[in-house]
Image (tube, helix red, strand yellow):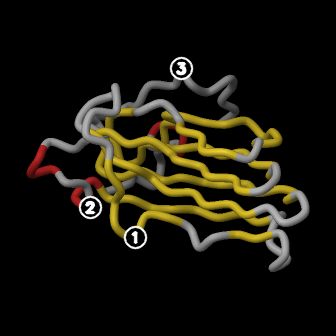
Amino acid sequence: MADFCERLSEVLCPLAMEYSDSIAAGTHYSSYVSLANYHRAWLVLNVGDMATLSTLDVQIMQATDTSGTGVKTITGKSITQLTQAGGDGDDLICIELRTEELDVTNGFDCICVRVVASVAAVELGWVLFGCVPRFAAVATTNWAEIVA
């Protein structure tokens, strides 16, 4: 349980990120990260302009190690497809994941972000946070600066 006095930078650790950029059409994977030290993960997406006819699909995938062994989907951990034709873009979206939603019985404790931009480029930035650490305090090495 979070303590009112703790800093968010002590309980949210950026594990993987894509800085705001134009993502070319194609399938893109983040690095695989371990959730062994966290109870939850939180993916925050900042979608910008979408080129004409582009679509965007994003999901969290699971694997048994940080090399991506046995990678497979996690039911219900993908966004509703965004489309330029549907007026999407300039959206802020998040996906929440509890570690018990992973296939822990078969040793799945690592995740990655899979991004599929179809037809044309999409401006996108995102951060995948490890949340609710099993051991306090979390590492702060992935932050460029913390102002508290």
Callout 2 amino acid: Glu
- Estimate the spatial distance between the alpha carbons at disc 2 and disc 3, rounded to whole Å: 27 Å
| Label whose residue precedes the other's in the sequence (3 or 1) | 1
- Asked if the residue at tag 1 contacts the one at tag 3, i.e. Cβ–Cβ closer than 8 Å, the answer is no
Q: Is residue 4 above or below residue 25?
A: below
Under circle 3, the secondary element is loop
Estimate the x, y position of residue 96 in percent, counting from the top left. 45, 61
Residue receiving disc 2: 101
Q: Label 1 near label 2: C-beta < 8 Å?
A: yes
Q: Amino acid at mark 1?
A: Gly
Q: CA distance from mark 2 to mark 1?
A: 10 Å
Mark 3–mark 1 Cα distance, whole angstroms, equals 31 Å
The numbered disc on residue 76 is 1
Q: Is residue 110 left or right of residue 148?
A: left
**Which residue lies most toward the bottom here?**
86
Instruction: Tell whether 86 sits left or right of 77.
Output: right
Task: Find out whether the residues at labels 2 and 3 contact each other: C-beta distance under 8 Å.
Answer: no
Of the two numbered discs 2 and 1 in the rendering, the one whose residue sits closer to the viewer: 1
| Corner quadrant of residue 81 | bottom right
Earlier along the polypeptide chain: callout 2 or callout 3? 2
Q: Quadrant of residue 67?
A: top left
Residue shown at 68% from the left, 23% from the top = 144
Tag in front: 3 or 1: 1
Residue with the most extreme left position: 105
Q: Secondary structure at mark 1?
A: strand
Q: Quadrant of the C terminus?
A: top right
For marks 2 and 1, the one nearer the N-term is 1
Mark sitting on residue 141: 3
Three-letter amino acid code at the position of disc 3: Thr
Could you tell me residue 2's position as x and y percent? 38, 54
